[in-house]
Amino acid sequence: VLDRGQRIYREHCMECHGETGKGDGPRAPFLSPRPGNLVSAATSAKTDKELLRTIAQGKPRTAMAAWQERLAVDDQQAALHYIRSLVQFSRAPITSPPPP
């Protein structure tokens, strides 16, 4: 599923959302509003159902097209699975408190 999702993302999403999903694809500077950052905390907090609805129905008044007529439901879900894999959490470095 992840490989299929990556192929779909590269073919249909990367031009706007960028290779790493940060909304910095080659078309992004020419779009208003700019494409969403798919790895942001705000997007990461959305449920799969919310994100699948956006993929299927698009976003009004943006360049985000509806994919429900162009991609099968399984392909939309594979793309979402790949998008979720782009999020990389990292721990803040643990530092010792300064000596008294």
Image (spheres, helix red, strand yellow):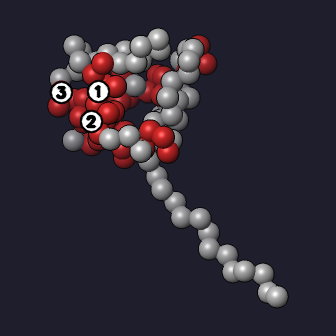
**Spatial separation of the CA atoms under disc 2 and disc 1:** 6 Å
Query: In the rendered view of the protein, which quadrant contains the N terminus?
Result: top left
Question: Mark 2–mark 1 contact, CB under 8 Å?
Answer: yes
Name the side, left or right, on which 93 lies relative to 44. Answer: right
Q: Quadrant of residue 71?
A: top left
Give residue 100's position: percent from left, percent from top.
82, 88
Q: Amino acid at mark 1?
A: Arg
> Foreground mark, 1 or 3?
1
Q: Which residue is mark 1?
A: 53
Give residue 64's position: percent from left, percent from top.
41, 18
Judged from the image, the secondary structure of the residue bearing numbered disc 2 is: helix
Q: Amino acid at mark 3?
A: Val
Question: Mark 2–mark 3 contact, CB under 8 Å?
Answer: no
Residue at (52% x, 60% y) in the render: 90
- From this viewpoint, is residue 70 visible? yes
**Spatial separation of the CA atoms under disc 2 and disc 3:** 12 Å
Q: Which residue is mark 3?
A: 73
Q: Is residue 100 above or below residue 93?
A: below
Of the numbered discs 2 and 3, the one sitting upstream in the chain is 2
